[in-house]
Image (cartoon, rainbow, N blue to C red):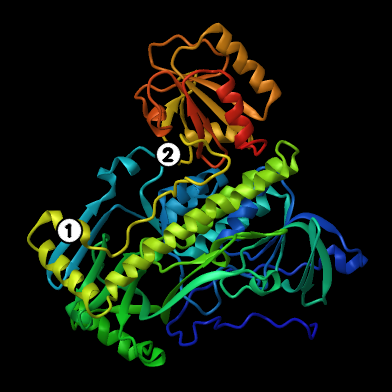
Amino acid sequence: MSAAYHDVAYTNGYEFTQGKGYELPEYPFVEPPELKTGEVRRHPIVIIGAGITGLTLACGLARLGIPAVLLDEDNTVGVKGASSRGICYTQKSLEIFQRLGVYERIAAKGIQWSVGRTFAGQDEVYSFDLRQNSSYSLSAQPPFINIQQFYIEGYLVERIYELGHVDLRWKSRVSGFKQHAGYATLTVDTPAGPYALEAQHVIDASGSHTPFHAWTGATMTSRRGDDRWCIADVRFKHRPPQERHTWIEAPFNGNRAVWQHLMGDEVWRIDYQMEPNADPEHVSREDVVRERLRLQFGPDVQAEIVWVGPYAYRSQCLDRLRIGSVFFMGDTAKIVSPFGARGGNTGVADADNLAWKLAAVLRGQAPATLLDSYNDERHEAAAQNVMVTNRTARFLRPAEGMERTFRSAAISLARQHPFARALINTGRMAVANSYTHSGICDRSGGLSVQNVSFRWADHSAGCVNDLIEWTGGQLLVLVFGDISAAAAQRLRHLGSAAPVRCVQVVGPDTRPQAREFVIDPQGHLQGACHVFGHAWALVRPDAYIAATGESVDAGLIQAIERAIGIKE
């Protein structure tokens, strides 16, 4: 083994792990061609980090037939010796995973849920059922699925191997970086020795401890509080309720907060808020954890401890998500408190946002300026998620004075009055972020499109993701209602002259005028596109609206040009 490369340590910041842990798959190290030939090769895309964000991007590129290299310093998914990490995946992420071809496996392994209950002491002060919310109810995917993050990562790895195009390089640690005009040079350490490669685009998804922040001179806004937690992944002999339960003030935890979620493999994730000065090693001891479980579930509780570890939350957001050839995504772009599932899910959305743009540029279907919109859109999302989770953190750990007074008043009112329950903040559940500052979206755009159902021309069932798959990474024009002969001719011309596919959407009793059409019997597709009556919607490959309008005219042409970065 080369002296320059050392295997990844088992701790990685989770110093006091207890329990049996998780068995993770291991992937073989394959000597890269650069080591064999000594040639410094230039690759169009090099991704750093095979976590959920980097793997989502790699899988998205592979699905579009775009070559890339992915470097990861370890030879597995997840974190050796650490917890299940992320567990709660939103409808938007699940829709993305369906397009990538891994959703069915996630749904089979994970736990679907929509009901959440929040308690203060013995009193239920807030509850919700997301299936009753129209924002969630029409998609082919459920509101949320709980599953250990490493399962999704493993499914993505297998899917990438199946699709091809992406070179997965394990035990490959980036130890050096130099930026040039239009490309970068990376030094990579491996068990077989170091080598260099060049990259036109570098995507840093290596996590919060990335060296690329220092290498690129990235600046950021950060905040670290004194909130301390202890996470326990537990398997019970007698199952607690499957619903998401949270306690703002748990009598069995010193009136501090507790979270309770069911994941795959009959494992519950329980998060206990600790005292600010709690000793991490002490609170993670098995006997201390078992005493907390007895206080919560009763003296006769029978439980297997799978993993235990302490955690401290912080927030951080880069000022820019692109510096030269380097794009930051996932935890390298921002770090948020985990309240409301806004961490890993936003990394998945980061990857989905950038994948189609890289593909369009590398295929010659869009100018390189399209890539600037990644920062505009995903920085807005990052800043919003940091703000939302910081508010939750302050509600759960209020400062003395006005914040604590407000929380006490909100809890007291919520016990008796339904109107006050909206003030209870244990985490505003993640939704697809809207883009209001995007240079490539019209004022009518920037909204996510749910994966709703429709009927193909032969009356077989389809969904929005099927249409997106059909476009092959191009834009999608959906025209609702009757269209004139002139408009039908313009749509045919658009389909041959621009990177778009055009489809008429008709009602169950409407005669189509276009060659390509689908049927929207209940109006779900039109509703998902946020338009009404005779209108068109320009849908991007990441299932976001770029623009909407009423007439098939020059306004549609301008919207297409703007959506691929030709003009603002």
Residues 348 and 243: in front is: 348
Residue at image location 78% in from the left, 59% down from the top: 199
Q: Which residue is mark 2?
A: 450
Residues 83 and 240: in front is: 83
Spot occupied by residue 503 in the image (x, y as percentages of width and height): 54, 22
Q: How would you rate the neighbour count of disc 2 (Cα within 10 Å): few for under 14, some for 14-19, many for 20 or more?
A: many
Q: Which residue is mark 1?
A: 421
Spot occupied by residue 440 in the image (x, y as percentages of width and height): 58, 40
Tell me: residue 549, above or below residue 216.
above
Residue type of the residue flagged with mark 2: Gln
Tell me: residue 191, above or below residue 461.
below
Spot occupied by residue 182 in the image (x, y as percentages of width and height): 79, 55
Quadrant of res 25: bottom right
Q: Secondary structure at mark 1?
A: helix
Residue at image location 64% in from the left, 37% down from the top: 564
> Can the viewer see residue 109 in this picture?
yes
Q: Residue furthest top?
A: 485
Tell me: residue 354, above or below residue 203.
above
Residue at image location 35% in from the left, 78% down from the top: 304
Residue type of the residue flagged with mark 1: Arg
Residue at image location 21% in from the left, 76% down from the top: 297
Q: How would you rate the neighbour count of disc 1 (Cα within 10 Å): few for under 14, some for 14-19, many for 20 or more?
A: many
Q: Secondary structure at mark 2?
A: loop
Spot occupied by residue 565 in the image (x, y as percentages of width and height): 65, 39
Residues 294 and 183: in front is: 183
Quadrant the C terminus occupies: top right
How far is mark 1 from mark 2, CA to CA?
A: 28 Å
Quadrant the N terminus occupies: bottom right
